[in-house]
Image (cartoon, helix red, strand yellow):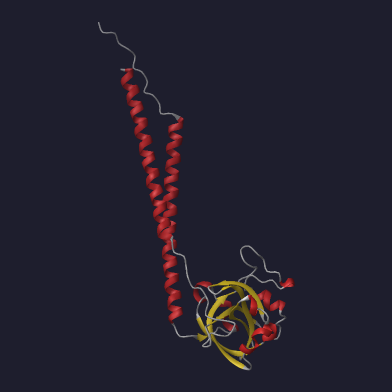
Amino acid sequence: MTPVHPELPRPRRSTAFWALLLGAALLFAAFVALGAWQLQRLAWKEDLIARVDRRLAAEPERAPGADRWDAITKADDEYRKVVLNGTFDHSRETLVGASTELGTGYWVLTPLRTVRGDWVLVNRGFVPPEFKTRASRTASETQGEDRVVGLLRLTEPGGSLLRKNDPAQERWYSRDVEAIARARRIVEGPVAPYFVDAAAADDQTRWPRGGLTVVRFNNHHLQYALTWFAMALMTAGIGVWLWRVERRRALGLDAAAD
């Protein structure tokens, strides 16, 4: 008579296995979400580049007056080509540290009293250190009413990433419109919340040199998205491998039990 053995219980999968499988699932979901987010950023960046390209190709329009200042946004207005008419107050210029294709030096920001009576800071362009003093370039200063064409830029409050503006010591690392206007005591009228990067002048032998605005946007979102999706696939592969290894182990133990 064949002896009857009691049926052995199937081996349970270990807690470690379930923890690893759960971790792989969570990582997979996170990587997919990050890849989808980068695709959204890609669409946003491509739209931004297209909008800026259209602005740069357009004819200059009248710079926004005080009645439109509250509606100005980075998405809708930055790098818009504008034109201003007014008179510079060269006695209240401000030098802001700059690094350009011409080397390191300074931006020359000069307040312009527009024909409407308000003020706009105009970045007249770049000067190297040897032309830092106003006396070294007074020949390039226009007198009386002038016409300025350039790109609308939004204020840069606070300073650069590594260095903060120090108005008391006349150390400026960003074009902070409000702080510069306060330091220069521009109180004769309202000051625009933006500045204008002046276009290049016909005479490129004089300082400051305009037209050096860098309009370039890094767009690596597609590569980032593909990287995240690849990591999601790798994580899924690891999860499948873990499942197969555990399944073979369970089957092996079942066979041994027979």
- Looking at the picture, does residue 203 appear above or below residue 218? below
Q: Quadrant of residue 4?
A: top left
At 34% from the left and 30% from the top, the residue drawn is 247
Q: How many marks?
A: 0
Name which quarter of the figure residue 190 lies in.
Answer: bottom right
x then y, percent, for residue 138: 65, 87
Which residue of the protein is positioned furthest toward the top in this rendering?
1
Q: Is residue 126 above or below residue 40?
A: below
Q: Position of residue 58 (x, y in %)?
A: 44, 83
Considering every residue shown, the one lying at the far left of the view is 1
Image coordinates of residue 14 in percent, x first then y, are 43, 29
Query: In this orientation, does residue 82 appear?
Result: yes
Left of 17 or right of it: where is 4?
A: left
Q: Can you see residue 189?
A: no
Residue occupying image coordinates x 43% and y 49%: 31
The one nearer the camera, 218 or 59, is 218
Residue that protrudes farthest toward the front in the picture = 130
Percent coordinates x, y for residue 167 in the rendering: 71, 72
Q: Is residue 52 left or right of residue 246?
A: right
Quarter in which the C terminus is drawn? top left
Give me the residue at 71% from left, 69% from top. 166
Q: Nearer the viewer, residue 226 or 123?
A: 123
In which quadrant of the rendered view does residue 197 lie? bottom right
Name of the residue lying farthest toward the bottom: 144
Quadrant placement of the N terminus: top left
Nearest the eye: 181 or 24: 181
